[in-house]
Amino acid sequence: MIMKKIRKAVLPVAGFGTRVLPATKTIPKEMLPVVDRPALQYVVDEAIEAGIEHFVFVTGRNKGAIEDYFDRAYELEYSLREKGKTAIYEQLDANTPKAGTMSFVRQQSALGLGHAIWCARDVIGDDPFAILLPDVLVKSDRSCLAQMVDAYNTVGGNIIAVDAVPQERVSSYGVIAPDTKSVRRDDGLIKMTGMVEKPAVKDAPSNLKITGRYILQPEIMGLLSDQEAGAGGEIQLTDAMARMMGEQDFHAFEYVGQDYDCGSKYGYFEAVMAYAQDHVEIGEQARALIKSRAQSF
């Protein structure tokens, strides 16, 4: 089986971030700092580890800070060099992408995730591509998307990242419907037949929630072009995937790692604590602080 390499990734960053207002009134939610870097930087780093060579950011109004962040800051870099702050300068330089590896397209109207992905169609072309929802961080030894690419190289088709949640919490998530006729594989891949958004506990087809990482074939763009509005009056990516499931294989992939929903206040707080404890500079202090605060309650 000859499969095209996963080289491109779409990151939809046009949302308002209403769940973390008022912070996001002036700061894009993707730029909220997790310890010492924006949440978005962690997502980009995850994709780079997976071999992504070109990023397509689907932006909206008041998201200029994202494009500026990935540009050079000549005055700042000059000042750091002049003051001998070499380590900080080298870190900034390492985070600056190579010219031509990032594209920014505008989603003028908030018409849903499916519409946001469709806005990237001309840059994606005929290539399979990854989607990373940037308000979800996945902390793992090997990046979540890198694990997914390994799985894709085994079976091809379309891959959706999932992880198990307690059965009583399934009604808070979108979950996948596994193909009960298929033999469960040992590599984390599960053939699937559908997806259900926030099912009642008694009706849930599984306890495997969709995490916010996808590898999709380019045919999804054609389906999104005429996809009717679904839940919330928006064009839903899940609706288009459900249509494509009748024509192409879809596998869920149970990755190894822990996800954090930085689009919620509690999830953001969790992420800051988790990443602080493993930070190369302040990890020991962070662990001691968290332990001391826990003992005081």
Image: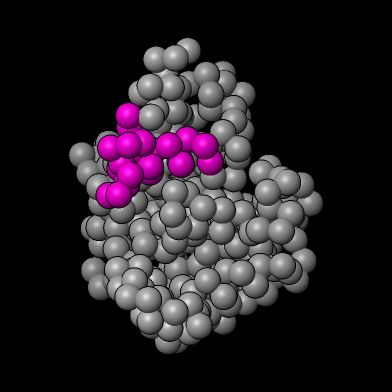
Q: Is residue 191 visible?
A: no
Residue at image point 44% right, 54% down: 36
Say which quadrant the N terminus sits in. Answer: bottom left
**Which quadrant would residue 19 be assigned to in this image?**
top right
Residue 14 horizontal/vertical position (percent): 66, 63
Residue 124 horizontal/vertical position (percent): 49, 77
Relative to 61, say whether 140 is above or below.
above
Magenta stretch bounds? 268-288
Residue 96 horizontal/vertical position (percent): 41, 76
Most common secondary structure along the magenta stretch: helix
Magenta stretch encompasses residue 271 = yes
| Residue nearer the viewer, 131 or 49 | 49
Magenta stretch encompasses residue 168 = no
**Which quadrant would residue 189 be assigned to in this image?**
top left
Residue at image point 61% right, 69% down: 65
Residue 214 horizontal/vertical position (percent): 45, 56
Q: Tell me: 50 left or right of 117.
A: left
| Residue nearer the viewer, 103 or 99 | 99
